[in-house]
Amino acid sequence: MDKVFKEGKYKITPMNVSHINEVAQIEQVSFPTPWSKEAYYNELKDNGFAHYYVCLACEQVVGYAGMWIIIDEAHITNIAVHPDFRGQKIAQTLLLKLMQEAMRLGAERITLEVRSSNRVAQYVYGKLGFYPVGIRKGYYTDTKEDAIIMWKNLYES
Ligand SMILES: CC(C)(COP(=O)(O)OP(=O)(O)OC[C@H]1O[C@@H](n2cnc3c(N)ncnc32)[C@H](O)[C@@H]1OP(=O)(O)O)[C@@H](O)C(=O)NCCC(=O)NCCS
C-alpha cells in the first residue's frame, strides 16, 4: 500500500477496549453526532457481528474503521482518521483491511452510507471500487442530510 505503511510507520490491528478513549476523541472531531464510548464498548463486547480495527502510530490511535458481517454481506459502520493524519492513505488502508477480513469471513458484498456532502469519503470509496446505488432521503437526523448508499462486490475489482 502506501509508502508510510511500507516503512512501518503505521500498523493496523484489531480494536480493543484500551483503544476506546482515543477512538472517542477522534469521533468527537470527525462527526456531527459522535458515537459514545459506551457504544464502542458494546460493539466490542456484545456484538458478535462487529469487527473493528485501529491504525496505530507509535501505539497512538490515529484512525479506525469497523463493520458488521451478516451472512454474506458486510456493512461498514464507521471510519475516521484523526485530522492531523488525514491524506496519508490511512482510510484506504483501513478499508482494504475491512474488505480482506470480510472476504475471509465469507462476505461477498460490502456496503455503507455516506453523507451527500462528504466528497472526500465518497472519493475514497469510489477509488476502492464502491459505486452509488441509491439515496436515503433525510437519513441523517442531525442535519436532515441525505445518505448515498454505496456497494461493492468483493469479487470484482
Ligand atoms: C474520510 C476520511 C476517513 C478519509 O481519511 P484519510 O486517511 O484522509 O483518507 P486517504 O488518505 O486514504 O484518502 C484521501 C484521498 O482524498 C484526497 N483528499 C482530497 N481532499 C482531502 C482532504 N481535505 N483531506 C484528506 N484527503 C483529501 C487525498 O488526496 C486522497 O486521495 P489520493 O489517495 O488520490 O491522494 C477522513 O477525511 C475522515 O476521518 N473524515 C471524517 C469522518 C468521515 O467523514 N468518515 C466517513 C464517514 S462515511
Image (tube, rainbow, N blue to C red):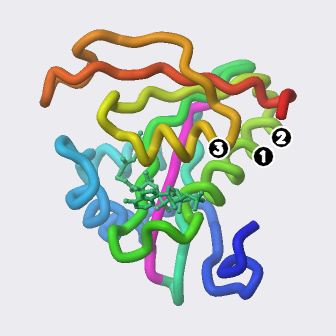
Quadrant including the N terminus: bottom right
CA separation in Å, label 2 and label 1: 6 Å
Report the residue marked by disc 2: 104
- Residue 53 to residue 32: above or below: below
Q: What element carries label 1?
A: helix
CA separation in Å, label 1 and label 3: 16 Å
* Prevailing secondary structure of the magenta residues: strand
Q: Start and end of the magenta stretch? A: 60-69
Within-10-Å neighbours for mark 2: few <14, some 14–19, many 20+: few
Kind of residue at badge 3:
Lys
Query: Is the CB of the residue bearing disc 3 within 8 angstroms of ligand 1?
Result: yes
Kind of residue at badge 1:
Gln
User: Which numbered tag is attached to residue 53?
Assistant: none
User: Which numbered tag is attached to residue 100?
Assistant: 1
Looking at the rendered structure, the number of numbered marks drawn on it comes to 3
Report the residue marked by disc 3: 127
- Residue 23 to residue 149: above or below: below
Q: Which of 3 and 68 is in front in this view?
A: 3
Depth check, mark 3 against mark 2: the one in front is 3
Q: Is residue 29 left or right of residue 99?
A: left
CA separation in Å, label 3 and label 2: 22 Å
- Marks 2/1 in contact by CB < 8 Å: the verdict is yes
Where residue 102 sits, quadrant-wise, is top right
Quadrant including the C terminus: top right
